Image (cartoon, rainbow, N blue to C red):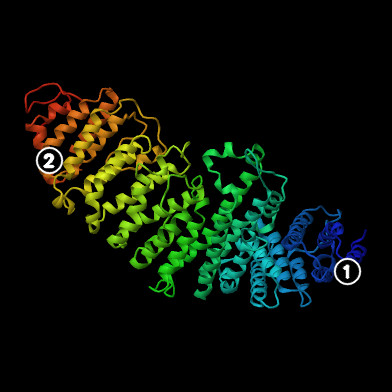
Amino acid sequence: MPPDRLLNTVLRAYQDAPNPSQTDKILGTTNTLLTSLSNPLNLSLLTSHFLNARSIWQQPDGLRTCLRVVSVFNTAAVHVRRNELHNAELPSGQLPTGGQVSAGHWAHAVAKGLDDRSSRWQHTLVLAGVLMGMEGEERRSLSWSLRSTLEQAVVTAANMALEARSQTSALGRGAVVLALTYAFPLLSGANKALLNGDTLLPAVTQAMLGEEGFRHGEFIREIQLDIASTANLAWSAASPSASHIQQLESRPLPQNMGPLSRLGAFAVEHARDSNIVLGIQDELLSFAAGVLRKWENCALSLVDPSVESAKLSPETLQGPWPMLWQLLRKILFSVVAIVQPIVGRCLLDPRLRNDSVAPILATKTLHILRNLSFVSSRQGGSTFQVYTFTYLTSLDILSRYPDTSTRFLQETLPPPPTSAVPSPVHQALSLFYLNTAEHLPLSLPTPSTDALIIAPATANLSPTSWLISPANAPPSSLTLELFESSHAALLSVFSCPQHGALTAPLIPFYIDALLSSFPARVSPRQFRLAFRTVMQVASPPYPISITHPGLSEALLEMLRFRAEGASTDPLPPVPDAALSSSSSSGTPTEKEPLSEQTALVLALIDALPFLPLRLVDEWLSHAAEASGAIRDPRMRDVARRRLWEVLASGELDVGRAVAGVAWWGTRGGQNLLGGGPDGPEEPMMSGALGHDVKESSRL
């Protein structure tokens, strides 16, 4: 059919009642006409009528219709440019392809069709599609001035649509956000700066959290209605809730949540009104709290990752279960991507970094992360850089305010543990609490430290803790992490001199718990680090070394006694083996064979640099004797090399180093250690030249 007749046909079809079966045909015909019409006036006419088509816009399919509009003009622009390049290379006499309108004239004609009969948000869809088709993927179809004009038109249409809030519906605001997620990477820095962050930020947040995005987490509530409680929890892939999650994932915004998050981050950084930024943080906090509340009420929240295969049906494991966690991780990444620039802005914006706003902002940020900790604690979900910056920066801000730090810990304090194993959600919340409390003892008064850090940490390490009870078999996925965080929280308190009154009576309990946990629940690296920290705290110049002068030696005696009867079998690989290479003090890598006995001897050696000077000589001998008592040659060599390293690498201060030299030279240290790091040396007279020493001349 000739283009002119086809144009009349499609213009009549625009006025028909909505018919989903005809929508695809109408859009396809529109795309064909956009590439085949040769009269720019007809292009403008087609665009104008298309944006007012009753058959398209009377009952739109949400943002899917908006995305198809962007796609129509994007595809048409690509074909127009392709036809232009193709026709330029045609030999004379051959018929050209398409409407023979240049890319620049075509873009100008389409833009003229964006009149007052249609909405600004519709204009944004069309302009974004044209910009993508002409300039996307390095096509460079337009002149520099025309591209700049087109970019400015996209920004102007978006700003006008979002600023006219009373005239722009929720669909319109979502359409603007959708268009910008595609057009934003193509905008120049100068044109990006023209976007109104004050109106864009609320629109992005509404689109992300609303019905076209994550639906305020309502999909979790729907899951509970479809779970069949049999021998295993069964959640059918054909259930309505699973279908809803599939539909949610296929929507335009969830499919492009990465670009949408970057757009939101840009809006946070460029919003002029700080109150709008704070309001968005409140919305994210409410959303995260709602997601946590709905997940706690879902039966699937009781399934620990360690027993998924036993608790869930095969159909659930292979179908909707991984799809659900993919969506939850997407929620975590998207929310943190918006929160991160809010925290970053708190460091620079004088309206946010003052003492009345900064601590509240940091507290709300930590509450958001806590509410999503059931996701971030799963399979390393908190290890990405944006999360780390957001978390640690919020802690740095919070730690400057003792009263606010105390209130936050009081608000999030886990309930006292019982013999029953808590749910995976409560385990994740407890882990987040302990990891956070580890950073705050310097900011807390001693009574608060005792109640808010020591009490929950010691409860996890006590012999009656659920972590080591038979009910926790097989161990939950967070058991080891909870042990580690409990140890770390106590060690952080020990390292604060102002809490010395708490440290002295607690150290014997802690060492007993540490020894009973090793090697079943604490790795050699963790054990050595913990014991080294305690020894450092119990030695000068810490006040406890004055009030309890015999504590450090008593601890070493406990360790030496334990080493004498410890197992000599090599320990299996541990979960944190990858971290061992980053530990300090020359810790040997976990790739080298270590037994329980060897690890205890190494911990004793690690403590030598912190001993009171009067004990250095005696315990160097004990360390050398303990190293020599290791039967396995390879493990014995590891211990001896570590002792030699302590003596020779500068870990000892001046006074202890002098004592070490005296022990080595005149008190039998060389004989006990075997002559040095490489074993016994050949006997020779003092001052003699070794075989590898060459004669030299002073001339």
Q: Quadrant of residue 433?
A: bottom left
Position of the N terminus by quadrant? bottom right
User: Residue drawn 22% across and 37% down?
Assistant: 558
Q: Position of residue 227 (x, y in %)?
A: 66, 47
Side of 367 relative to 625 (left or right): right
User: Residue drawn 37% across and 56% down?
Assistant: 437
Q: Position of residue 356 (x, y in %)?
A: 40, 74
Which circle, 2 or 1, is nearer the viewer? 2
34 or 309: nearer the viewer: 309
Q: Position of residue 11 (x, y in %)?
A: 88, 67
Question: In the rendering, which numbered label is found on residue 615?
Answer: 2
Question: In the rendering, which numbered label is found on residue 15?
Answer: 1
Side of 481 relative to 242 (left or right): left
Side of 22 relative to 290 (left or right): right
The kind of secondary structure element at disc 1 is: loop
**Residue type at the position of mark 2:** Leu
The answer to the question of whether label 2 and label 1 lie on touching residues, with beta carbons closer than 8 A, is no
User: Residue drawn 18% across and 30% down?
Assistant: 624
Q: Of marks 2 and 1, which one's residue comes earlier in the chain?
A: 1
Q: Quadrant of residue 38?
A: bottom right
Q: Quadrant of residue 631?
A: top left
